[in-house]
Image: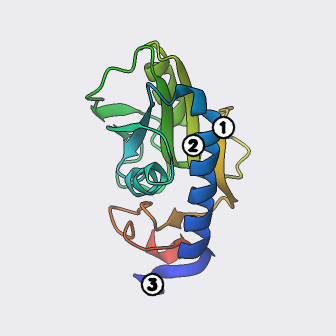
Amino acid sequence: MHNDISEILFTEEQIAGRVGEIGAAITRDYADAADEGIVLISVLRGAAIFMADLARQIDLPVEMDYMAISSYGNGAKSSGVVRILKDLSSEIEGRHVIVAEDILDSGLTLTYLLKNLSSRQPASIAVATLLRKKTLAQAKIDCKYIGFECPDEFIVGYGLDFAERYRNLPYIGILKPEIY
């Protein structure tokens, strides 16, 4: 797998440091909500690793829940069609929600998800994305917490995949074009 990576963008240590900073910021920002806690929602499968690490860095009560949403299939570009494959198990009405996203690329999937979650009337909703790609055609999404800005390349590792491979790399790197 490592030979399929053309460049490492963010090392395991850089990721751990930045996730710690985001966790500390969330702890500060939601200190007044300590009694009721927050609901972290991960978009499976890519963001599961990020959310697990992030939850351990938040010093508040945290409930974790998961949604599975598809817009890529096995391709390298978003299909533009968004489907909910697994919905939340928890009620979020009146609760503080933070969506833990692995990467903000086109923003199509996240735009759909935020509209869906907002219709359930949470007390607040925020986005924590590990990566935000620098793309011109990106949907306008307010991300309260951004781990890293990254180039418009095909990124894998730390939960991000190509055809379900490379998620277990401890770093984030650019996949060689001949692979996809």
* Number of numbered labels in the structure image: 3
* Amino acid type, mark 3: His
Which of discs 3 and 1 lies nearer the camera? The answer is 1
- Report the residue marked by disc 1: 144
Picture coordinates of residue 132, whole percent (x, y): 64, 50
- SS of the residue under disc 1: loop
Indicate the quadrant containing the N terminus: top left, top right, bottom left or bottom right. Answer: bottom left
Which residue is found at the position 46% from the left and 81% from the top? 4
Given contact means CB atoms under 8 Å apart, are the residues at marks 3 and 1 in contact? Answer: no
Please state if 117 lies on the left or on the right of 104 as rendered. left
Please state if 114 lies on the left or on the right of 28 as rendered. left
Q: Earlier in the sequence, mark 3 or mark 2?
A: 3
Which of discs 3 and 2 lies nearer the camera? The answer is 2
- Report the residue marked by disc 2: 128
Would you say residue 132 is visible in this rendering?
no
Q: Residues within 10 Å of mark 3 (few under 14, many from 20)?
A: few
Q: Residues within 10 Å of mark 2 (few under 14, many from 20)?
A: many
- SS of the residue under disc 3: helix
Depth check: give the residue in front, 123 or 31. 31
Using the image, determine if residue 176 lies above or below residue 36: below
Would you say residue 6 is visible in this rendering?
yes
- Report the residue marked by disc 3: 2
Q: Earlier in the sequence, mark 3 or mark 1?
A: 3
Using the image, determine if residue 95 lies above or below residue 5: above
* Amino acid type, mark 1: Lys
Depth check: give the residue in front, 60 or 47. 60
Depth check: give the residue in front, 109 or 40. 40
